[in-house]
Amino acid sequence: MEACDLGDDPKVDTGEKPLHVLTYDPWRMAWRFLWPTLPGLVIFSLAVFYKFQDDPSATILFVQGAGIILLAGTLYITCDMAMTGGFYLYGDRIVKRYRTGQERSIPLDRAKISITQAQMIAQILFTSADRPKLVSYIKDVYIDAKLAKPGDVAAFKDAVAEVSGQDRRDLDRRYFAAKLMKKRLG
C-alpha cells in the first residue's frame, strides 16, 4: 500500500486533512508473518506445552513461563500488525488508526520520539512524555518501519521533521531519542 490521502477515505473523515499518511505494505506484512513470526509461534508453543520428564521443576517453570510471555508478546505484535490501518500525521498530533475504527493519538507538543534503525529492526516510537517506555509499546504510537516501503518511511520522516523542527539528519541516525517538538506549534 502506498501512502495515501485521507480525504479519499469516506470511513475516516475527521474534517481535517493529515499532512502525511504512512501505511504498512501487505507483502512486507506477509513476509513478516512467515518469518520470523510463524516459526516463533511454533517454538514458543512447544516451550509452553512440551511435556518435560527428567528436568528439575525450576527449569520446567522457567521454560514454560518464558514460553508463555514470548507467545503472548508474539501474538499481540502479530495482531497489532494485522489490524493497523495507518499512521496519520497532523499538525498537532499523530494518530495510529486500526481497521476496527479504534485509534491511538499523541499530541505532538507532549510527545517524545525514539528511533532505532539496524539491520533487522527499524522502529519509530512516539510516546507521551509522562508514560514509562515499556507501557508505551502498548499505549502509544509504535511504527515498525520495516513493514512500510523505505520511500514511504523517508517521506514520513520528512513530514515529521517539517512539523516538529527536528533536523532531518537526526531522524536518519541509527539511534535517536528526543522531545519531538523543537519549535512552538502555531
Image (cartoon, helix red, strand yellow):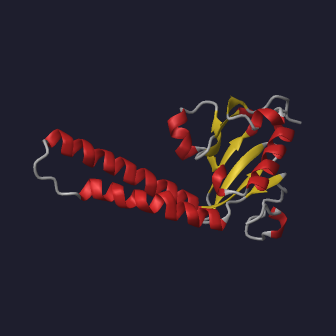
Residue visible at 52% across and 63% down in the picture: 33
Q: Hey, which residue is sitting farthest front in the picture?
A: 119
- Whether residue 91 is visible here, answered yes or no, is no
Residue visible at 78% across and 44% down in the picture: 157
Q: Is residue 12 above or below residue 172?
A: below
Where, by quadrant of the figure, is residue 139 drawn?
Answer: top right
Residue visible at 39% across and 49% down in the picture: 70
Residue 98 in the image: state x and y as whole percent.
62, 60
- Whether residue 48 is visible here, answered yes or no, is yes
Residue 116 in the image: state x and y as whole percent.
64, 38
Where, by quadrant of the figure, is residue 6 drawn?
Answer: bottom right
**In the rendered picture of this protein, how many numbered marks are placed on residues?**
0
* Quadrant occupied by the C terminus: top right
Residue 51 in the image: state x and y as whole percent.
17, 57
Q: Is residue 71 left or right of residue 109?
A: left
* Quadrant occupied by the N terminus: bottom right
Where, by quadrant of the figure, is residue 113 drawn?
Answer: top right
Q: Is residue 30 above or below residue 150?
A: below
Residue visible at 83% across and 69% down in the picture: 8
Q: Is residue 29 above or below residue 141?
A: below
Q: Hey, which residue is sitting farthest right in the picture?
A: 186
Residue 143 in the image: state x and y as whole percent.
64, 49
Q: Is residue 5 left or right of residue 58?
A: right
